[in-house]
Image (cartoon, rainbow, N blue to C red):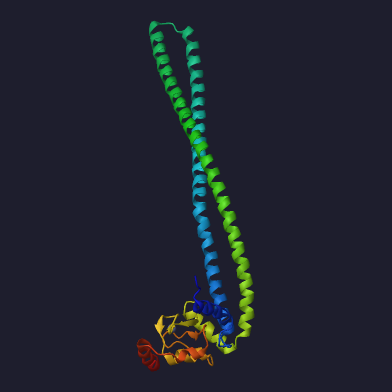
């Protein structure tokens, strides 16, 4: 097997050229844009972290809420049961006193009335006991729910803690990279000529952070439109700062030397040449 020699040499030639673009004036600006774009990307990633954390915090909050709610209703049921128990105690006391009075009854009529009274009191006692039983059953139910809610809370807590640690670490790494980049950004900004930097910053604000556009295959990669060949040649020569006639981004070239531009001009480029000239 034979390696395609042309491709290999192209790739080799490409690397050093990337490091030193033809236009020395634009060189720090190209680096600056790379840093600026990375800063935007990092800030965006950091901005999304609280929302990602929130996704894992929601089930935790829900588990806490359920546990609180169930505990509160259990407490209310326990109170209710106690109140019924007090009622029962008072009622049993009344029945006892009622029975004590039985010895003092003289007539059959009085005795019949007493029996009726006792029967009613026993019925009421049964009702209170029923309420106590019902409350106890419900307490048992809510206590089971509490056990489940506690397990679910523990699970969500563990998941959240793990996720938070991961995201905190990610944020820490992003913040560190961002801090480094901001130092580089400052240094590089100092290397760019002031008027050019101001122009760059102004363009950056209106062109989605991309003030510079690379030319590739005669196309401005900022707006994807074909550029007039003459403009492409000028940019390739790297003598001055040129902007795209369509999107106004500052054009730059990373590639083979300017001699290459004297090649044939295709039909489409020739057409665009006229458009570019008129703008
Ligand atoms: Zn453009």
**Residue at (39, 6) in percent of width and height:** 108
Q: Is residue 133 left or right of residue 187?
A: left
Q: Is residue 208 left or right of residue 271?
A: right
Q: How many marks?
A: 0
What is the x, y in percent for residue 178? 60, 69
Which of the two residues, 136 or 200, is positioned nearer the viewer here?
A: 200
Q: Is residue 188 above or below residue 169?
A: below
**Residue at (58, 60) in percent of width and height:** 170
Which of the two residues, 252 or 148, is positioned nearer the viewer here?
A: 252
**Residue at (39, 13) in percent of width and height:** 116
Farthest front residue in view? 1
What is the x, y in percent for residue 34? 55, 76
What is the x, y in percent for residue 126? 43, 20
Q: Is residue 131 above or below residue 211?
A: above
Q: Is residue 29 above or below residue 126?
A: below
What is the x, y in percent for residue 141? 47, 32
Which of the two residues, 134 or 272, is positioned nearer the viewer here?
A: 272
Task: Name the image quarter holding the C terminus.
Answer: bottom left
**Residue at (43, 14) in percent of width and height:** 118
Q: Is residue 163 above or below residue 181?
A: above
Asked whether residue 76 is in view, the answer is: no
Ligand 1 resides in the quarter of the picture at bottom left
Asked whether residue 176 is in view, the answer is: yes
Which of the two residues, 223 or 74, is positioned nearer the viewer here?
A: 223
């Amino acid at each position: 097997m034979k390696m395609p020699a042309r491709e290999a040499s192209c790739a080799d030639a490409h690397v050093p050229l990337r490091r030193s673009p033809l236009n020395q004036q634009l060189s720090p600006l190209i680096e600056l844009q790379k840093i600026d774009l990375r800063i935007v990307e990092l800030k965006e990633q950091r901005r999304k972290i609280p929302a990602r954390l929130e996704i894992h915090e929601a089930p935790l909050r829900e588990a806490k809420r359920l546990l609180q709610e169930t505990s509160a209703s259990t407490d209310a049921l326990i109170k209710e049961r106690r109140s019924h128990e007090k009622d029962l105690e008072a009622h049993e006391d009344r029945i006892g006193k009622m029975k004590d009075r039985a010895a003092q009854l003289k007539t059959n009529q009085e005795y019949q009335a007493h029996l009726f009274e006792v029967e009613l009191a026993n019925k009421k006692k049964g009702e209170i006991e029923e309420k106590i039983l019902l409350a106890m059953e419900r307490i048992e139910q809510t206590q089971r729910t509490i056990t489940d809610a506690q397990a679910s809370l523990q699970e969500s807590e563990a998941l959240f803690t793990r996720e938070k640690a991961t995201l905190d670490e990610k944020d820490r790494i992003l913040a560190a990279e961002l801090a480094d980049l901001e130092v580089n950004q400052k240094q590089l900004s100092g290397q760019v000529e002031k008027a050019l930097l101001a122009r760059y910053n102004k363009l950056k604000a209106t062109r989605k952070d991309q003030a510079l556009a690379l030319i590739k295959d005669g196309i401005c990669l900022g707006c994807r439109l074909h550029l007039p060949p003459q403009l492409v040649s000028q940019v390739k020569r790297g003598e001055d700062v040129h902007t795209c006639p369509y999107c106004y981004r500052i054009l730059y070239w990373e590639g083979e030397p300017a001699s290459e531009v004297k090649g044939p001009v295709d039909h489409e480029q020739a057409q665009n040449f006229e458009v570019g000239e008129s703008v």
